[in-house]
Structures are given as structure tokens and as C-alpha cells.
Image (cartoon, grey):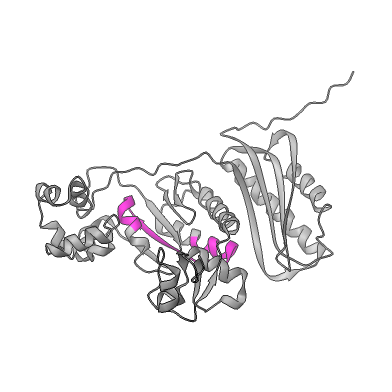
Amino acid sequence: MELKFPIRKIIHVDMDAFYASVEQRDNPTLRGKPVVVGGSPSGRGVVATCSYEARKYGVHSAMPASQAIRLCPHAIFVKTRFEAYREVSRQIREIFFDYTDLVEPLSMDEAFLDVTQNHKDIPSATLIAKYIKDRIFEETQLTASAGVAHNKFLAKVASDINKPNGLTLITPEKAEDFLEELDIKKFFGVGKATQKKMHAVGIKTGANLKQWSEIDLVKAFGKSGRFYYRIVRGIDHREVKPHRIRKSYGKERTFSEDIDSLEWINNFLDELTQTIAEGMKKINAAGKTITLKVRYKDFETITRSYSLSHYTNRYQDIMDVVRKLMAETEVGNRPVRLLGITLSNLNLNENTVWEQLELSF
């Protein structure tokens, strides 16, 4: 395929069965069982999402809960917990930002990343995608699927190929053949109604779609016809557009075993603070507000914060505050399963750390 535009390195990351996976993580009794997140089947509830165990029975998002229970009578219905999902979403965004500032969120559980130029100077987008997937699992105990390609459309399609926990690369050389063989229902942007209409005129694969001229596609499908004409040829020049400015920088880790050794915890927080200080300097950022996050053995989660009078990205400044915040928790007396440190109220693109000076009179 001849590419006249600069070749970008785009990753699309999509969490696997996001809400349901969070519920199974936080409640071990749900693991391996058909979990449906959403409204009650006894009312007019709707499925927000469901676990892969439930999907085997034909349950899917946006389906009436009453229909879901008929398809899978032994399904376990749980209510949505958006605060929990938002917290995980924040965690994975922070991981993304470690690699690039060009992050375009599509929802709480998926985003595009442009890693053509990245903070780690890693030339391979596939390797970055693997690192991101590994980090997500290490820090959240959840899996994600990723697609890697030279444009957004192909990356989005690729992320769905080997779900769950998949990683698919579509190179520019293989894009054309890949799209010709692809089932039309796998084309991002082709909904059920359009799919039905395409089937009616004999379009079932990318190869079928490619036989149509742009004029005929516009006649049959309106303005969307131009989009279909381009994507089946792998043409997508859209840039990854960040929706917001980064507001915080932090790291946290969930431990495989509950920790009650204060010495071990102090050493861990010391290393974590060094990592954060180095990371802040790499992205030329400094922060005023430092937050310590603790999740105890019984899943109770607390945060303690302190705001400085100046911006900082220095290890010693951060560590001094973390020690003070530690004294406001029960760490050392209660076993912990997660610890995290976050800097917020950021000043970005600053190489200078500002301090409040004390003047003697």
C-alpha cells in the first residue's frame, strides 16, 4: 500500500469486559462466573456490560436485563459502581501518560495513543503496547487488548481481533490484504443497521466493499459512503487529539500478598517516590499537592493529601510529605494491599522548581 502521508505509530488500548472485570477483581467469589453489570432483570434494567462467561450465552451490552436472564438463568447481576471504574480509568490513563502526552480517550476503558515520538524513546510501538498491557495488569490486576497500526481506524479494528488480553499488529504492508479478508461486521463504524443493508447488496467482506466506487457508495449509504470507501483502502489521516491537559502524575501498586511490615512499606514508598520524582522531571512537570493512597486488607481505601506552597518534583520534598501523611494512616497497624503516591495541581513544561522563600526581619 502506497502511503503519501507520514506513517504514524498508533496504539488503541481497550480494557477487557471492563466493568465486569473490575467486579470480579474486587469480589473473588464472582471470578469465573457469568457476571452482568447493570439494571435488575426484574425491572426495566439494561446490561451495561458482562463478563466473557456471560457472553458465551449471547448476553451483550445494551440488552434488556430481562432478556439476559432468559439467555443465562444463572447469571449474577451486580449494580454499577462508577466510582470504582473511574478510579481504574485514572490509573490506566496515568500509565498511558508515562509513554506519551498524545492520549485521546474514547471512554473510561479505551483510548488512542500516538507513540511516534514517546517519552521512553522506544522505536517499537508493539513493544510499547506490550509494556502498557503488562503495566495495566501489574497495577490493576485487569487485562487489556491492544491494536497497533499506522492509523486510528486500523488500530481500533486490530484491538478487537484477539480479545481478551490480545495484542495485534497491522503493518502498512499487510493492511490492504487484512482489510479485504475482514468480515464487514468487524469494520469500526459499520453498525448493525448498515451491516444489514450491506448484506442486502452483497457486501459481506472488505473485498466486496472495495469493488464499489465512491460514487455508488455515496448513493447507497449517503455521506458515510466516502468514509467506507477510504477505510477499506486503509486511508485514515485523523490525528490523535488529546481531550484534556494532564492534571496529575502518580504511581500505585497492588501487592500479591497483604503487607504489615512497616520497614518494608517505608522502603517501598521510598523507591516509589524516587520513581515519581524521576518521571516528573522527564515530562518537565512539578506539582503542589501530594496524595498518599492506602488500601487495607479489608478493601477499605483512604487518601491523605497535603498541599505545598511551591511546585516541586524533588524526591526529598515529596518524601517528607509522604512521611507526614503516613502518620495520619493506620499503616503498620493494619495490613495493606495497595499503596500509591500522586502529585496533582501540576505546572507542566516547567524546568524550574519554585520555592517559597522565608525572609528574616
Work out which quarter of the rendered image holds the C terminus and state it.
top right
Q: Position of residue 212 (x, y in %)?
A: 10, 55
What residue is drawn where x is 81% and y is 62%?
263
The residues colored magenta run 133-156
Give the answer, above or below, for where 339 lies relative to 118. below
| Residue 329 located left or right of residue 113 | right
The outermost residue toward the right is 361
| Residue 280: quarter of image | top right
Residue 103 visible in image: yes
The image shows residue 339 at horizontal and vertical percentages of 70, 58
Name the residue at 54% across, 55% down: 89
Residue 195 on image: x %, y %: 22, 61
Left or right: 233 as drawn, with respect to 314? left
Q: Nearer the viewer, residue 307 or 9?
A: 307
Q: Is residue 152 magenta?
A: yes
In the image, taking residue 93 as reference, residue 319 lies left or right, namely: right
Residue 165 in view (yes/no): no
Task: Kindly give the residue lying farthest to the front in the view shown.
Answer: 43
Which residue is rendered at x = 78% and y = 58% of the image? 266
| 301, 168: nearer the viewer | 301
Indicate the position of residue 306 as horizontal and vertical percent values. 75, 42
Tell me where residue 157 sits by quadrant: bottom left
